[in-house]
């Protein structure tokens, strides 16, 4: 394989670029529809990417928007992987600001080291979470 391929499987490219730890994780993300390639949701990991394509996906709570610059031949070290793409992701938000979001806010959080809740505290936490099932 002396010539570089013009196209590469999307799961393989995501693994080469070190966005996923294993190729099977990248493949599962593709099959679940979590990867958007040029505005179209990818449902198969066999979809191909080429230079100039745009990918969108979530990495943890953060949205990643990348442009494919090169395809690469192997999963190399981090500097080599970072040369495969240009990052156009929105800036990451500080954790304090993210905690104000209702989806990520801790519900009924207790101070570290305060021990197990008492029965009254547990019932209060259940009411706060909406888990109380009074029969």
Image: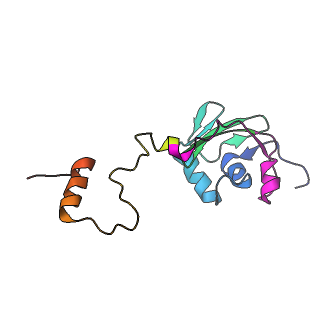
Where, quadrant-wise, is the N terminus in this rendering? bottom right
Position in image of residue 11 (x %, y %): 66, 50
Nearest the camera: 135 or 98?
98
Nearest the camera: 23 or 94?
94
Q: Report the number of numbered marks.
A: 0
In the rendered image of this protein, does residue 56 appear above or below residue 17? Answer: above
In the rendered image of this protein, does residue 127 appear above or below residue 90? Answer: below
**Residue 130 seen by the camera:** no
Q: Residue 84 vs residue 99: left or right?
A: right
Q: Is residue 15 magenta?
A: no
Main SS, magenta residues: loop
**Residue 6 seen by the camera:** yes
Nearest the camera: 120 or 11?
120
Residue located 18% across and 52% down the image: 132
From which residue to which does the magenta span run? Answer: 68-96
Q: Residue 74 vs residue 44: left or right?
A: right
Position in image of residue 10 (x %, y %): 68, 46
Residue located 39% across and 68% down the image: 113
In the rendered image of this protein, does residue 68 appear above or below residue 116? Answer: above
Color encoding of the figure = rainbow
Position in image of residue 6 (x %, y %): 82, 42
Q: Is residue 88 magenta?
A: yes
Position in image of residue 4 (x %, y %): 87, 48
Residue located 64% across and 55% down the image: 20
Nearest the camera: 126 or 120?
120
In the rendered image of this protein, does residue 111 appear above or below residue 97? Answer: below
């Amino acid at each position: 394989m002396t010539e570089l391929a013009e196209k590469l499987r999307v799961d393989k490219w995501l693994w080469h670029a070190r966005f996923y730890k294993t190729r099977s994780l990248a493949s599962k993300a593709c099959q679940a529809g979590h990867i958007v390639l040029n505005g179209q949701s990818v449902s198969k990991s066999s979809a191909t990417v080429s230079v100039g394509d745009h990918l969108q996906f979530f990495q943890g709570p953060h949205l990643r928007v990348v442009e494919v610059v090169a395809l690469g031949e192997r999963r190399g070290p981090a500097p080599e992987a970072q040369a495969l793409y240009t990052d156009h992701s929105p800036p990451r938000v500080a954790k304090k600001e993210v905690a104000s979001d209702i989806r990520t806010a801790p519900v009924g959080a207790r101070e570290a080291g305060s021990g197990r809740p008492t029965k009254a505290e547990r019932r209060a936490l259940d009411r706060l979470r909406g888990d109380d099932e009074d029969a």
